Amino acid sequence: MNLRTPSKNPMTKHGWIKTGEEINTIAEGGEVLRDILLRTAALAKPGASTWELNEFADREIVKAGGRPSFKGYGPKKNPFPAALCTSINDVVVHGIPSREAILKNGDIISLDIGMEYKNLYTDTAMTVGVGTISAKAQKLIDTTKKALNAAIAQASAGNTTGDIAYATQKAAETAGFSVVRDLVGHGVGYDVHEDPSVPNYGKPRSGAKLQTGMVIAIEPMVCQSEYFLVIDPDGWTIRTRDGGLAAHFEHTIAITEKGARILT
């Protein structure tokens, strides 16, 4: 899950920096969450409802000793109602699971999931095809995954969030797609969203400097054509304005002396 402006993490003696022990705990939770996401994705078949996917993910998180961190997140008057974001086709992020949303052959769906585990948070997402999808949709999914890998390769101490952003943007635009500009990746660990913001477009050497011990969620959101967005009346579902497809991948990673450590 992502926001236009992440909230600042709680005041701690470490600031943005997590201890080695904390990172290991985040990695433990991240491994659990990644397994749940993969098993949830395997259920994304024609005829399945997004509500079924959410119920499975919610149940498995609780069974593993975690808490679904998206459920109840957000403003008190309109909290997110589910454990899983299910974003189909032109929905970029924050799609709300529904019994009426039935997956069809040819759809693509982004599954975004977060968990609090031993008082620390992880966040991860992936986009998969439902049944047989078009070559263009497959290229979009593959490109978004490549953009994530390119971004992670820049996530090392001494680099900046701008280096991550530039790598993401270059990977998407080289393939003929665009990256979302109104939503960002973010710090994570002590809370669902922390500083710094991690954009998907920008200039090298700009933004926050990456330091050993930082934990961030990198999440490319790539659009088939234009990157302009609209928000549904539910206050959560964010779509491409032109109705084009969108894909989304995300990993929680730690900055180490040897580069990025993928925690999910």
Image: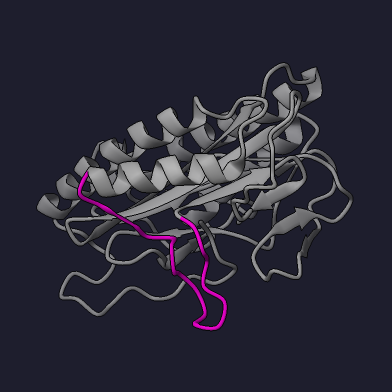
Q: In this view, does 208 lie above or below 25?
A: below
Res. 251 visible in picture:
no
The image quarter in which residue 232 lies: bottom right
Determine if the magenta segment contains residue 78. Answer: yes
Q: Which residue lies furthest to the right in this view?
A: 242
Q: Which residue lies furthest to the bottom in this view?
A: 77
Residue found 16% across the figure and 45% down from its top: 24
Q: Position of residue 75 (x, y in %)?
A: 52, 80
Residue found 52% across the figure and 40% down from its top: 52
- Nearer the observer, 211 or 253: 253
Question: Which residues make up the magenta segment?
Answer: 64-82
Q: Which residue lies furthest to the left in this view?
A: 21
Q: Position of residue 23 (x, y in %)?
A: 19, 49
Asked which colour scheme the image uses, the reply is: one colour
Is the stretch drawn in magenta largely helix, strand or loop? Answer: loop
Q: Position of residue 260 (x, y in %)?
A: 33, 39
Residue found 62% across the figure and 60% down from its top: 183
- Nearer the observer, 33 or 14: 33
Quick one: quadrant of the C terminus?
Answer: top left
- Give the side of residue 19 with respect to residue 62, left or right: left
- Give the side of residue 161 with respect to residue 172, left or right: left
Q: In this view, does 143 lie above or below 253?
A: above
- Give the side of residue 214 with respect to residue 201, left or right: left
Q: In this view, does 132 lie above or below 17?
A: above
Q: Position of residue 245 (x, y in %)?
A: 78, 39
Determine if the magenta segment contains residue 26. Answer: no
Count the marks.
Answer: 0
The image quarter in which residue 188 lies: bottom left
Residue found 55% across the figure and 83% down from its top: 77
Res. 37 visible in picture:
yes
